[in-house]
Image: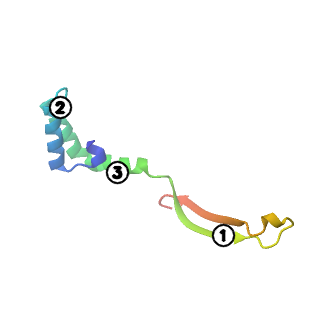
């Protein structure tokens, strides 16, 4: 919960206080350790979560068009729309 919300110090303190007060929650010593760990590693944890949730490939370019067939052997295929999509993917950061 702390990492997904990217809590600041005030939010962290309120969250940990609530966790110590609820039945079956954490102790105040555990809350102190969690707070110290979060203060020291918040940036690294946040960056790690962002990197894990990002795709490796990124969309660099996209072109699309819709074609209509005007002449074919079979009359039932005339004016049938065909969508053509071209996507260029690249590695993140390249």
CA gap, disc 1 and disc 3: 41 Å
The picture places residue 89, in percent across and down from the top left corner, at 57, 60
Number of marks present in the image shown: 3
**Disc 2 element:** helix
Q: Residue at x 36, y 47 (%)?
A: 48
**N-terminal label among 1 and 3:** 3
Q: Determine crowd level at label 1: few under 14, some 14-19, many 20+ residues with C-alpha closer than 10 A.
A: few
* Residue of label 3: 47
User: For the residues marked 2 and 1, what is the alpha-carbon distance in whole angstroms?
Assistant: 61 Å
Q: Mark 3 or mark 2: which comes first in sequence? A: 2
**Would you identify the image quadrant in which residue 27 lies?**
top left
Q: Residue at coordinates 63% horizontally, 65% vertically from top-left?
A: 86
> Of 13 and 90, which appears nearest the observer?
13
Asked if the residues shown at circle 2 and circle 1 are in contact, with their CB atoms under 8 angstroms apart, the answer is no
Q: Residue at x 27, y 48 (%)?
A: 5
Task: Residue at the far bottom: name it.
Answer: 70
| Residue occupying the point 74% across, 69% down | 79
Residue 37: image location, x then y, percent: 22, 40
Element assignment for label 1: strand
Residue 2 placement: quadrant: top left
Rendered image: mark on residue 30: 2
Q: Nearer the viewer, mark 2 or mark 1?
A: 1
Residue nearest the viewer, comparing 2 with 67 = 67
Query: x%, y% of residue 46?
Result: 32, 49
Please say if 35 is above or below 50.
above
Label 1, on which residue? 66
């Amino acid at each position: 919960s702390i990492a997904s919300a990217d809590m600041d110090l005030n939010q962290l303190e309120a969250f940990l206080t609530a966790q110590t007060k609820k039945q079956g929650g954490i102790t105040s010593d555990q809350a102190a350790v969690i707070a110290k760990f979060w203060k020291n590693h918040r940036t690294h944890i946040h960056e790690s979560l962002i990197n894990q949730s990002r795709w490796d490939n990124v969309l660099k370019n996209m072109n699309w068009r819709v074609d209509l067939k005007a002449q074919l052997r079979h009359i039932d295929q005339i004016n049938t729309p065909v969508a053509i999509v071209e996507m260029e993917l690249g590695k993140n950061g390249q």
